[in-house]
Amino acid sequence: MAGSEGPRRSARDWVVDSLSFTLAVLVGLVLYDGGRNDPIPSWLLDLDFIAGMALCLALWFRRRWPVQLTVIGAVISTFSDTAGPATLMLILTVAIYRPWRTTLAMFGVNAVSLAIYLLVRDKAESVQETALWAILFYAALAGWGLYLRSRRQLLQTLRDRADRAEAMALLQAERGQLRAREEIAREMHDVLGHRLSLLSVHAGALAYRPDANPTEVASAAEIIRASAHQALQDLREVIGVLRAPVGELPQPSFADLPALVEDSRKAGLPVELQFDAPGNLPEHVGRTAYRIVQEGLTNALKHAPGEPVRVKVVGAPGNGLTVELHNPAGQARRGDGQGLIGLTERAQLVDGRLEHGRTPEGEFRLAAWLPWPA
């Protein structure tokens, strides 16, 4: 907790300081008037008033120098009644703004000051009563100050925790938005990439074969229309990620994999499928396998159109599921690699693994192993 006022005094500080100063002056004047009957020299009585009022003025700086002013107050209190209220407020300030050890030390200094005061003001007849009341005042103010200090520390701790919780919530929200964006990007790439590749293949065939007969043109146009319609439907589903949790959207299943291969065949891609996976495959694993095959066929359509592709999907409960695609993409163009990065992330999410690259025979190989619990 800071011991200085800082660059500005708040409105609350102005009110508290004004009340403290006014109260110290009024009570000090009352005590000064009552102390005139003490058997002390007149010069000491005048010094009592002047030093006491000066200490009251010093209350405006008690937050900046609480310990120093308390020591000065203890010195003045050895002979001054007027300084008594200001000294008590300084003890309270030390208890609020300084550790308890410092408060205990100031308590001891003022106890010594009290003993000297009783001798200087010749109060031998009321030593016990005066000392008792003074110690009770000191202890009460020190205890109150320590309580206020502990309460302020608790409130500050709660504020810090609230700030950290708010910052953590904001960070989690940002991470959630980032994950949602990544999910949207992945879904758009996986879902639309395949459909648009089919569109590109058939549109390219129409462009480079102006001599095609009307039946072939009509067939290609119908495939383009159907693929465009399906791509639009898929796009609507992907955009739904912005309005609903991903888990509530229609998702392809492992059973849709043969239909996916058949669509690629209709697009003119020779695909040889080895499909042997009897049993109930977990839904999230089956969907990952579907996306891997989909990405592999999409890359084959883009980079090696017309080249044969071998697809192998085999597995059993307890042994895992193996997914492999081979195609002779010897002259494949380099892409940005985002599809393969997304597949790697998908495989890792289900505790699987994925690898890709050239084989010694020059083929491109995309292979994954996915867990299949028994």
Image: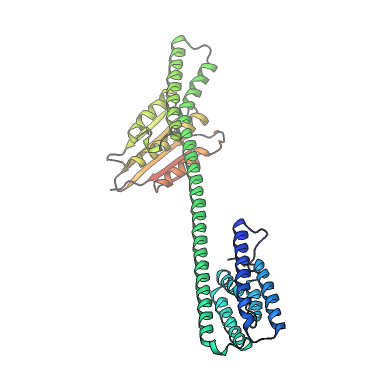
Q: If the image is split into quadrants, where does the N terminus sit?
A: bottom right
The front one of 111 and 249 is 111
Q: Is residue 138 left or right of residue 49?
A: left
Quarter of the image holding residue 112? bottom right
Residue 356 appearing in the image: no
Q: Position of residue 103 (x, y in %)?
A: 56, 76
The front one of 1 and 148 is 148
The front one of 268 and 178 is 178
Q: Which residue is drawn at the image coordinates 37% and 35% (left, top)?
A: 248
- Indicate whether 193 appears above or below 42: above
Q: Position of residue 289 (x, y in %)?
A: 38, 39
Q: Is residue 326 left or right of residue 32?
A: left
Quarter of the image holding residue 313? top left
Residue 369 appearing in the image: yes
Display coloring: rainbow
The outermost residue toward the right is: 43
The outermost residue toward the front is: 37
Q: Which residue is drawn at the image coordinates 49% and 33% (left, top)?
A: 299
Q: Position of residue 254 (x, y in %)?
A: 34, 36
Q: Position of residue 183 (x, y in %)?
A: 46, 39
Q: How many marks?
A: 0
The front one of 185 and 80 is 80
- Indicate whether 116 appears above or below 153: below
